[in-house]
Each structure stands twice: as C-alpha cells, then as structure tokens.
Image (cartoon, rainbow, N blue to C red):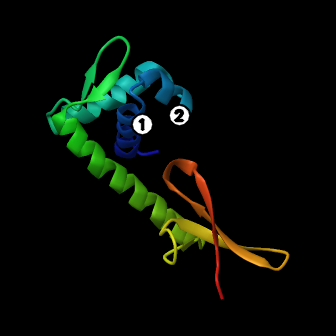
Amino acid sequence: MSDRLGELTAFVRAGETGSFSRVARELGVSQPSISRMVASLEARLGVKLLLRTTRRAAPTDAGGAFLKRARQILGDLDDAENAARGADTCAACCGWPCRVHSESVKLFRVCLASRGSIRTCALSY
C-alpha cells in the first residue's frame, strides 16, 4: 500500500470508527502506526483532521469535509479495481459493483456495497 493510500485509508477508517486501535486491528498494524499515518497526513495538509481523546477520535470540521471526499476517492479506486477484474455495475437496481450468477434457473446479481455488505438483486427478463 502506498504511503498516501495508507494514510487515506487509516484516516477514513479512524474517522468512521472513532478508534485508532480498531483500525490497527482491521489493517493488521500497530496502533502507533495508525497514529503516525494520520499525523503524517495532517502534517502534509497543514490541518488537524481528527480530534483525539484517550477514548475516541472524531473528525474536525475540516476533517469531516475531507472524510467525505476521501470516502469517494477510495470508493472510486474500488470501482476501478472491480472494473479491471471484470465486475459489472448493477445500474438497473443499485449501482454497486456486482457479478451475475445463475442458481438453477434463477438469475440474480450479487452486489457488493461499500465496506463489504452484500445485497442480492433479482434480474428481470
């Protein structure tokens, strides 16, 4: 993972979960590594993105605006990777990346929402 992508991912997950420790567990790194990644991003941008307490991290006003854009960037990256792998987009029902599957005579799409939730959408012909 590139440094900037790692920083962005660490920031987004910390902003969403409010926990550096949880993000560290999710990404398989130490909690101080997550803190350093977010601090490096803040230093590069010259703005405080997260307010930290001993219990929680919460986005600042600037962090909230950046979080929204960063989620979009990471989502666009996921879409590009799915397109490269040949996953379709389910424009008919939900717009999420998906694959068409056949189970007996039923056709359906398994659509992958952001952050891994799955939704099944029936195809009509």
Instruction: Out of 115 and 21, give the one closest to the viewer.
Output: 115
Q: Residue visible at 73% across and 77% down?
A: 107
The disc, 2 or 1, on the residue closer to the chain's N-terminal end is: 1
Q: Position of residue 64 (x, y in %)?
A: 24, 39
Residue count near mark 2 (Cα–Cα under 10 Å), binned few <14, some 14–19, many ≥20:
some
Q: Farthest residue in the bottom direction?
A: 125
Does the image show residue 21?
A: yes
* Residue 28 in sight: no
> What residue is rendered at 52% in x and 71% in y?
83
Residue 26 is labelled as: none
For the view shown, which residue lies furthest in the top direction?
54
Q: Secondary structure at mark 1?
A: helix
Q: Is residue 1 above or below residue 14?
A: below
Question: Mark 1 = which residue?
Answer: 13
**Proximity of marks 2 and 1: CB atoms separated by less than 8 Å:** yes
Residue 13 x, y percent position in the rendering: 42, 36
Q: Is residue 121 left or right of residue 60?
A: right
Rendered location of residue 102, percent (x, y): 77, 75
Which amino acid does the dot numbered 1 rest on?
Arg
Residue 7: image quadrant is top left
Which residue is labeled 2 in the image?
27
Amino acid type assigned to the residue bearing label 2 in the image:
Leu
Furthest residue in direction left, as rendered: 46
Q: Quadrant of residue 66?
A: top left
> Seen in the image, is 115 located left or right of residue 77?
right
Residue displayed at 39% across by 36% down = 16
